[in-house]
Each structure stands twice: as C-alpha cells, then as structure tokens.
Image (spheres, rainbow, N blue to C red):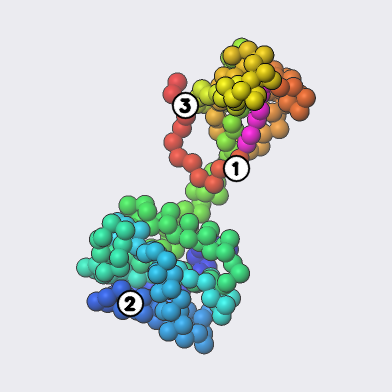
Amino acid sequence: MELIQTLNPKCCTTDLHGKTKDQVLLALSELVCKNPALEGIDPQEVFIQLKTRESQGSTGFGKGIAIPHARLDSVKDFVVAVGVSRRGLPFDALDKRKCRLFFVILGPSDGAADHLKVLAAISRLASQPDVKKELLKSPSGIGLYETLARRVADLNTSFHTRKAMKLMFLVLYYEDLLYDILEYFLAQGIDGATITEGYGMGQYISNVPLFAEFIGFMQPRKNQSKTIMAIFPAEQENQLIAGIEEITGNLNTSQGAMIMTTDLSFYKGTMKVM
C-alpha cells in the first residue's frame, strides 16, 4: 500500500477552523469523510473514535503538527486527510503550542500493523522542516494535495533506491580476535564500526556465594567483552558470517563469540571516521 493511495484532493484543505479541540476534531472528521471510500460513514462516528483516541493522549506531538488517528470496523481501506490552519488551533499538543498542520488517519480495525506503517510514514514526512514549510504555504487544497503527492513520491524514491541494510552486533570475549575481525571488515568494504566494552554475566554471579565455586575458575579476561556494531548491505550477510567464523570457529560449537543481526528500517549518518 502506497501512502499516496490514501489521499484524495477532496480531503485536503488550507482553511481549517475551530475554537476548541472538539471543534477541530469534528472539522477533521467531516473533511476525511469527503473521501469516496468512506461513503455512508457518519462524520459523528469518526469524531467519537478520534476523540476516544485523544483521551488516551494527545496526538499533537509538537512543532505545530498533529496526527489524530483511529481504527473503525466500518472502514475497509486506509484514508488520510490533511488540513492546514494559518494561525494555529488549540489541540493540547505536548509542547503546549497551537497546531497548524493536521493529518487524519482512518483505518480498518484489523489493520494495526499497516496503521503503524502509515503513521510512521506521515510522521517521517511531516517532521522534515522543508516539507512542513512547503505544506503550510500551499495556496489551496489542490495545491496542498499536489505538494503532498510530489513529496510522497520523492520519499518513496529515496527509500526504494537505497540498499537494504542490516545492523550487526558481534560480541567477542577474546580480544585477540578483535583486530583480525576489523581487518576482515575492511577487506569486505566495511570501513566504519563502533566498539563498546562490557562484561559477561560471570563477572557478577561469581560474587554470589551460591555460584562462586562454579564461576571462579574463569579467567577475568573471559568475563570482559568487546561488542562491534557495524552496518552492512543485507546481501552480504551470509558471506560476512562465513568469513567471521573462519576467524572465530563455528559459532554453534565454540564459545567466546556471538553474532546478532537485525534489519534496519531507517538510518542516517555514518560510522565511518577515517
């Protein structure tokens, strides 16, 4: 599902009004119900659900932006509405400032995972200062829609063309392996990493009388660890792990090292300092 598919020009306005938070929520409910996908749904029903969500905590997250949202049994597809207030409207925002840019998200009750994705995408988009500035300057609802469509397309392009990346945590209890690992990383094109020092559980439970006789035989250096954190292209995962095990030995049968990797949904910046 693409974010642009949730938008409709009829659900974009640069003339949002309201003297109270309830009035703003009602205006937004009426705006989002202009989408043909919500035909037959009463704006009052939407208002009640948005207000119920607001009672759990304000969706005005600061810097003049609010993203009220709700899930309804009667909604089959995700729908987004966008409203701009020139002067700002009261919305109990976390930073106590009035809100000027509003996004409304409605989704089906059974779409929690997709709801989070839509919410994250809009939050990421609205949090970009240049995007926010351009949206607030839109001359009309159509202009607001066109700006959003272009910005969403730009966002999709930047994320779709970027390589899928992963984050690796490599914990080593044998420091003499550290430099061999780093040398291998450099050979594989990973020229930036962060290394932290830590202690294994044995460092602490050896001081507990109940376990002391079992842990005491361990050398102090085996209780200390180095953790290497590095970002690498997902396509290199199997190759990197195989190369690391040539240095550490089979990690399923040997002790002293452990690898964990996780997908990265977002990253910015670099660990490279050379």
Q: Residue at x 44, y 63 (%)?
A: 149
**Labelled disc at residue 92:** none
Q: Based on the picture, tell me whether residue 82 belongs to the magenta stretch.
A: no
Mark 3 or 1, nearer chain start: 1
- How many numbered marks does the figure carry? 3
Q: Is residue 245 left or right of residue 140?
A: right
Which residue lies under the disc numbered 2? 22
Mark 3 or 2, nearer chain start: 2
- On the image, the x and y values in percent for residue 237 come to 67, 34
Q: Residue at x 58, y 61 (%)?
A: 113
As displayed, is residue 20 above or below residue 238? Answer: below
| Disc 3 packing (10 Å; few <14; some 14–19; many ≥20) | few
Frontmost of labels 3 and 1 is 1
- On the image, the x and y values in percent for residue 66 come to 36, 64
- Residue type marked 1: Asp
- Which residues, given as a range, are shown in magenta? 256-261
Q: Residue at x 25, y 61 (%)?
A: 97
**Labelled disc at residue 272:** 3
**Could you tell me if the residues under marks 3 and 2 are in contact, i.e. CB atoms within 8 Å?**
no
**Could you tell me if the residues under marks 3 and 1 are in contact, i.e. CB atoms within 8 Å?**
no
Magenta span: predominant SS is: strand
Q: Residue at x 43, y 79 (%)?
A: 48
Mark 2 or 1, nearer chain start: 2
Where disc 3 sits, the SS reads loop
- Residue extending furthest front? 209
Which residue lies under the disc numbered 1? 263
CA distance for labels 3 and 2: 49 Å
